Amino acid sequence: MAYRAGIVGASGYGGVELVRLLTSHPGIDVEVVAAHGQAGEPVANLFPNLAGDRHFDAIDPDELAALDVVFLATPHGPALDLGAVLHDAGTRVVDLSAAFRLSADGFGTWYHDVHPRPDLAAGDDAAATSTVYGLPELPDPVGGARDAGGATLRDRIREATLVANPGCYPTATLLGLAPLASLIEPGTIVVDAKSGTSGAGRPAKDHLHFSHVHGDLVTYGAPAHRHTGEIERWLPAGLGAITFTPHLVPMSRGLLATCYGKLVDGTSATDVQDALHSAYDHEPFVHVLASGTFPHTKALAGSNGCQLSAVVDDRTGRVTVTSAIDNLGKGAAGQAIQNANLLLGLEETTGLTAIGMYP
């Protein structure tokens, strides 16, 4: 018998990617496809890839609370309210927004608002007992380093009620840098990241018109993009502040993060490769490429995969780590399903693949 799921915010790009992926999931049936502004409208009118007679549902908290799992693909404002309501009802929730990723203090710093439920803010290890940051491959900051035999966050995700699904930029960055934490000098990390336009959401925005983005490349959000705080919070302790600069590139989906850091004296290229392989050789969705071979965003399109590689510059003593994901896959909906599989006791890889559509 399949688990019963609901998607709130199904008319957005993350929400519709959830609908697409869950359509063929053998263990989860989507019973509610809710969208506030499009309630009652045919889904296929907005997304022609989802042919059929399904209509968007209205948002009914009582109906959602009766389900086995609810995915929230809304902005963080609505997610703060509905996520708390569903959590308190005992319903398992995977939230794709930034509502619960930081501590309450961190939320105030980066989102300039008071967090209404500090007990559900995953960034506070002491306060949040039933909320977990949802990057399964990340070493558990409480459980110790992976290379010392410590646990990853997947172990806590299995026992959670509410999972704070990571942002797309933090996912790519953290996967690339976390295994190298003990090898990098604190305060030296620079992240140069580029994302397709779907990362900005579906609502019409002037700067996302085809005639504006075609043939263009632009920086935005520097020097205080909100994802900076999320990356700093979930990097292993002691690495200090980072410089994070995102860019918008003229493609619909895909994300590439190029991360730089000064290596601790005496660190070799072999040390870097050993750390990455130790972290990910057993992981189903993260693939470490040979040093000097760099990941392509197109290779991950439509998948929940991450490809990464690292090179060491002996002249400068710096490491360059390049990490690629699909921002709607491992950066949003795919990772949300990976987390839901863990929450529901399903095999983590169910309904997902690390293999992208190519060419």
Image: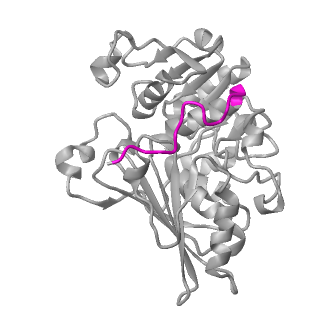
Task: Name which residue lies at 78% across and 46% down.
Answer: 125
Task: Name which residue lies at 52% across and 22% down.
Answer: 7
Choose between 282 and 173: the one closer to the eye: 282
> Looking at the image, can residue 217 be seen?
yes
Q: Is residue 354 magenta?
A: yes
For residue 113, side relative to residue 297 (left or right): right
Quadrant in the picture for the N terminus: top right
Q: Is residue 348 magenta?
A: yes
Task: Name which residue lies at 59% across and 14% down.
Answer: 64
For residue 24, side relative to residue 214 (left or right): right
For residue 239, side relative to residue 199 (left or right): right
The magenta-colored residue range is 343-358
Residue 231 is situated, as x and y percent measured from the top left of the image, at: 59, 56
> Looking at the image, can residue 226 be seen?
no
The chief SS type of the magenta part is: loop
Number of labels in the image equals: 0
- The outermost residue toward the left is 211
Picture layout, residue 271 above or below residue 193: below
What is the image's colouring? one colour
**Displayed quadrant of residue 155:** top right
Choose between 293 and 200: the one closer to the eye: 293
Residue 308 is situated, as x and y percent measured from the top left of the image, at: 52, 61
Residue 89 is situated, as x and y percent measured from the top left of the image, at: 72, 17
Picture layout, residue 145 above or below residue 130: below
Choose between 35 and 267: the one closer to the eye: 267
Residue 124 is situated, as x and y percent measured from the top left of the image, at: 75, 46
Picture layout, residue 174 above or below residue 94: below
Picture layout, residue 270 above or below residue 100: below
Task: Name which residue lies at 40% across and 58% down.
Answer: 296
**Displayed quadrant of residue 94:** top right
